[in-house]
Image (cartoon, rainbow, N blue to C red):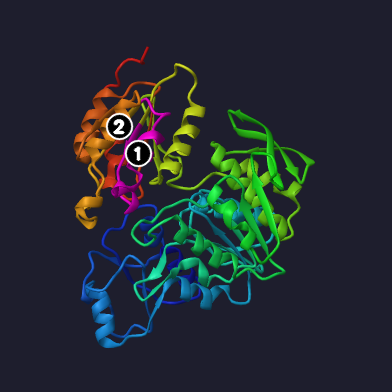
Amino acid sequence: MASLAGLLREKGHALTGSDQDVYPPMSTQLEALGIPVRSPYGAANVPSDADLVVIGNALSRGNPEVEVVLDRKQRMSSMPALLAEEFLRGRTCLVVAGTHGKTTTTSILSYILHHAGRDPSFLIGGVPVDFERSYRLGRGPHFVVEGDEYDTAFFDKRPKFVHYMPDVAIIGNVEYDHADIYPDLASVQRAFVHLMNLIPRRGLLVAGLETPALREILPKAQSPVETFGLGEGADWRAVDVKPAADGWRFRLLRRGADLGEFRLAVPGEHNLRNALAAIAAASAAGVDPQATRPALASFGGVKRRLEIRGRVRGVTVYDDFAHHPTAVRETLRALRSLLPTGAGRLVAVFEPRSYTSRTRVFQEEFARSFQEADRVIVSAAHLPGKVPEKDRISESELVRAISELGKDARFVAGVDDIVSLLAAELREGDRLVVLSNGGFGGIHEKLLRALNAVATAPPSR
């Protein structure tokens, strides 16, 4: 929504907005644009003379702003529908979808096209470091958009990405997620098949080979398909992969042809896969794979994706959006690869905040996802009452399961208690990552302030 607001502001529209909670990086972006955001929700936030009210998918019947719009019969739309009509129609649309990695892949692809002089437009669900904002209205023909499988609005329960008219679509992976709207994996697969069916026969589907649920549905594609991955059989493949101080070095193969050595500046095997998908889609848009080298080597990442929030007295504090077991596991693997042997501990603080992470559906998988961490702190779930009690995650059971796998795990309910505990226990050389898809009570800033105020303990032996 904040990204769409930025695009609309660039077209000269006057905007106001509202949300229950507003936090960085999007709050910072909106402030810079001079777009006032009112909080919390209330009927008075909706101007009676608004030409259009755009309603986000987090709002449902009973919300005071939704109710006043319906009472007044004001013109309303959803974010995906308005994006399509105002910005996508008539452009070459590159849609990036998948359960994981959408934001980073969209950012890499946009950066490649920008670096290649294509002057792309984009809309991203996060803020790329290289652009410092989540949207861009370029003069080139290409529009890169992050395509989410979550529903559009309370009045349109289709996935957002069905609005986006893809010429090229990336589906990086397919796993079960969004337990509040998808009853099972098969329903998630059907959503992605819907996207595949919207690609014209002259278009292209770029698909990851490493999740079985995606491989199962690839035969349903109506367009040409190019695959990517780290294993045998992929059309686009990274081999001779070597972690380095400046990221990853790898050789790029395209259908077996060796295109030479490349460097990716961000850590994590998951980001290698994201880069492969972006290279393939950029190639479909006319960018020679060889010309992607400068962008890959200088790509600065995305805020809230392995973002370093600060270093205080030898302790590095990261922020990451991970809220699914696979994302948690890949994030911790990436951080582990950055830790020299014996240099310090990897500490993870996890807030169950997304709907799926607050349910029992992934409780066992979450326990296994923390294997790379030395210490795990689980906070109280955010707004647990939103999940029926019988379906709700048990933080104590999760901590017990992590401990049974040989990890030092602890449940600490509140942000201030977590900060006090960590400020006293973190040591020089430790790396701490906060895993949450929300603001988490400003934990990053609070922790950095507390670390500044407390002498760090001696290095761990």
Residue at position x 27%, y 23% in the image: 425
The type of residue carrying mark 1 is Glu
Residue at position x 24%, y 24% in the image: 424
Q: Does the magenta run of residues contain 354?
A: yes
Residue at position x 35%, y 35% in the image: 367
- In this rendering, the answer to whether 396 lies above or below 141 is above
Q: Are marks 2 and 1 in contact (CB under 8 Å)?
A: yes
Q: Residue furthest right?
A: 257
- The residue singled out by tag 2 in the image is 401
Residue at position x 49%, y 69% in the image: 7
Q: Quadrant of the N terminus?
A: bottom left
Q: Is residue 45 visible?
A: no
* Relative image position of residue 199 (x, y in whole percent): 63, 68
- Asked whether 410 or 186 is in front, the reply is 186
The type of residue carrying mark 2 is Ala
Q: Tag 1 or tag 2, which sits nearer the N-term?
A: 1
- Asked whether 292 or 159 is in front, the reply is 159
C-alpha separation, residue under disc 2 versus residue under disc 1: 8 Å
- The residue singled out by tag 1 in the image is 364
Q: Is residue 149 visible?
A: yes
* Relative image position of residue 144 (x, y in whole percent): 58, 62
Q: Which of the labelled discs sits on residue 36, or is there none?
A: none
Magenta stretch, residue numbers: 348-374
* Relative image position of residue 208 (x, y in whole percent): 60, 49
Q: Quadrant of the C terminus?
A: top left
